[in-house]
Image (cartoon, helix red, strand yellow):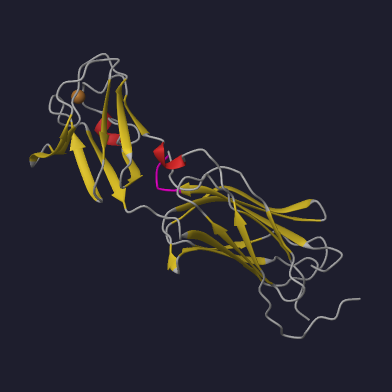
């Protein structure tokens, strides 16, 4: 029988270095000009360029493919203000592509010179991580008796700063029974609370609740950026207390999934 310090607040750090050879950040982001965009209408649903807004890190590349039958342009600026000069494809024909690499951070609206209702945005951010940086996921749970919902706080930070626009899946099980399963969670400020279904049993050593968070990337619209993919699983089992924390060390060329497994032992 384990002695559990009353009111103890014990934090375990699991450092997971998921180093993979795939250069995740070299992947270009694709944007399509779909069929039918040469007549107005697509602007009503922001579907003249798909996706309408993409996010890349500094140094990231965006490739536009003309999937329409008409020729278009990808021209930085707006129909109202005219070209900004940042980039310009000039006319690019059906079935061809245009590519631009973004060397500085900022918001870059663009439009089509031929069909000025066609507009899109490229949002270029500072690289979210470097060799010293890491994405941190804090999973903090309360405690719960049988029939009660367990509260789970999930916080994403990087170098102490809250991260914005995180996408993740969260799943919690107790003795194999799923008590929480939310896919495709998007959060604007990196701080989220989840409540499980009523637990089949009180959370205990014999009936631990396992919380699993899988990071799917940063961004508002797909494709997302950042450490996407599954590489490493960390199992964090606190001796006592109700807090488990996981740090992911992320190298710039690694694809890393964030998977935290937390065993929840109730506070006494
Ligand atoms: Cu066009």
**Residue 212 lies in quadrant:** bottom right
For residue 61, above or below residue 169: above
Residue sitting at x 17%, y 29%: 112
Q: Nearer the viewer, residue 132 or 117?
A: 132
**Residue 130 lies in quadrant:** bottom left
Quarter the N terminus occupies: bottom right
* Ligand 1 lies in quarter: top left
Residue sitting at x 74%, y 70%: 238
**Residue 161: x percent and y percent?**
42, 67
Q: Nearer the viewer, residue 257 or 216?
A: 257
Q: Is residue 145 left or right of residue 141?
A: right
Q: Is residue 76 left or right of residue 248?
A: left
For residue 133, above or below residue 71: below
**Residue 158: x percent and y percent?**
46, 63
> Magenta residues, as a range?
218-222
Q: Is residue 255 magenta?
A: no
Q: Main secondary structure of the magenta part?
A: loop
Q: Is residue 45 left or right of residue 222?
A: left
């Amino acid at each position: 029988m384990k002695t559990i310090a009353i009111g103890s607040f014990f934090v375990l750090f699991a450092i997971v270095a998921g180093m993979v050879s795939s250069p995740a950040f070299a992947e270009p982001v694709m944007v399509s000009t779909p069929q039918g965009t040469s007549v107005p209408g697509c602007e009503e649903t922001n579907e003249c360029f798909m996706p309408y807004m993409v996010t890349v890190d500094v140094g990231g590349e965006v490739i536009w493919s003309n999937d329409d039958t008409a020729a278009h342009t990808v021209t930085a600026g707006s129909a109202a203000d005219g070209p900004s000069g940042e980039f310009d494809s000039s006319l690019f024909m059906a079935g061809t592509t245009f590519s631009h690499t973004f060397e500085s951070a900022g918001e870059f609206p663009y439009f089509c010179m031929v069909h000025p209702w066609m507009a899109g945005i490229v949002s270029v951010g500072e690289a979210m991580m470097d060799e010293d940086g890491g994405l941190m996921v804090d999973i903090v749970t309360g405690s719960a008796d049988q029939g009660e919902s367990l509260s789970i706080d999930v916080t994403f930070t990087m170098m102490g700063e809250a991260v914005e626009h995180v996408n993740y899946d969260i799943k919690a099980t107790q003795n194999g029974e799923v008590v929480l399963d939310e896919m495709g969670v998007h959060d604007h400020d990196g701080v989220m609370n989840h409540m499980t279904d009523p637990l089949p049993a009180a959370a205990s050593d014999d009936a631990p609740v396992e919380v699993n968070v899988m990071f799917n990337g940063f961004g508002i619209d797909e494709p997302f950026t950042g450490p996407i993919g599954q590489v490493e699983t960390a199992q964090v089992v606190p001796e006592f207390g109700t807090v488990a924390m996981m740090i992911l060390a992320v190298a710039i060329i690694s694809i890393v999934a964030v998977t935290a497994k937390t065993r929840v032992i109730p506070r006494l």
